[in-house]
Amino acid sequence: MSIVIDKTKCVGCGKCVHICPGNVLRQDVQKKAYPEDPSDCWSCVSCMKECPVQAISILLPMEISAGGGRMKIRRDGNITAWEMEKTDGEKIVITTDTNEANKY
Ligand code: SF4
Ligand code: SF4
């Protein structure tokens, strides 16, 4: 999987650059984020969780979404919404609560 950054949405906050454990991301002269070498990304999704405007999405592998698709992450307090959209338009949203991370 690899991430894709929508520069039209990016507000140049730099949060993704600072959180990336692989030092993959950079900012251009307009402060817009981009992956210097996408092959260095190991899809940990930390940058997606950190982005305040959902500018970063990840391409889903065929095992999850035949024919492609993308996922975005939206966070609101303890709740994380994992929003998947397949190429046929089908949308799937899974929510998790960090307060229940050790529940089971
Ligand atoms: S998914 Fe993880 S490794 Fe890849 S760019 Fe984002 S923070 Fe870095
Ligand atoms: S966290 Fe989002 S808005 Fe901020 S620099 Fe990265 S992509 Fe742009």
Image (tube, rainbow, N blue to C red):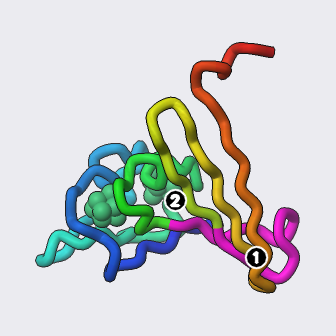
Between tags 2 and 1, which lies in front? 1
Going by the image, does 19 lie left or right of 93?
A: left
The response on whether ligand 1 sits within 8 Å of label 2 is yes
Badge 2 crowding class, 10 Å Cα cut-off, few under 14, some 14 to 19, many 20 or more, is: some
Secondary structure found at label 2:
loop
User: Which is nearer the eye, 16 or 71?
Assistant: 71
Please tell me which residue is depicted at 23% across the width and 67% down the height of the picture: 11
The residue drawn where x is 61% and y is 48% is 81
Disc 1: CA contacts within 10 A as few (<14), some (14-19) or many (>=20): some
* Residue 7 numbered mark, or none: none
Residue drawn at x 51%, y 59% is: 41
In depth, the one of 83 and 38 nearer the eye is: 83
Q: Amino acid at mark 1?
A: Lys
Closest to the observer, 99 or 51: 99
For residue 74, side relative to residue 86 (left or right): left
Residue 32 in the image: x percent, y percent?
A: 24, 72
Q: Which mark is residue 41?
A: 2
Give the alpha-carbon distance from disc 2 to disc 1, as whole Å: 22 Å
Quarter of the image holding residue 10? bottom left
Is residue 68 found inside the magenta-colored segment of the image? Answer: yes
Q: What is the number of the mark on residue 86?
A: 1
Q: Position of residue 16 (x, y in %)?
A: 34, 53
Secondary element type, mark 1: strand
Magenta span dominant secondary structure: loop
Mark 2 is on which residue type? Cys
Place of residue 36 in the rendered image (x, y in percent of width and height, measured from the top left): 36, 70
Q: Would residue 18 appear left or right of 47 to someone viewing this image?
A: left
Establish if 88 lies above or below 2: below
| Residue span colored magenta | 57-70
Quarter of the N terminus within the rendering: bottom right
Residue placed furthest toward the left: 29
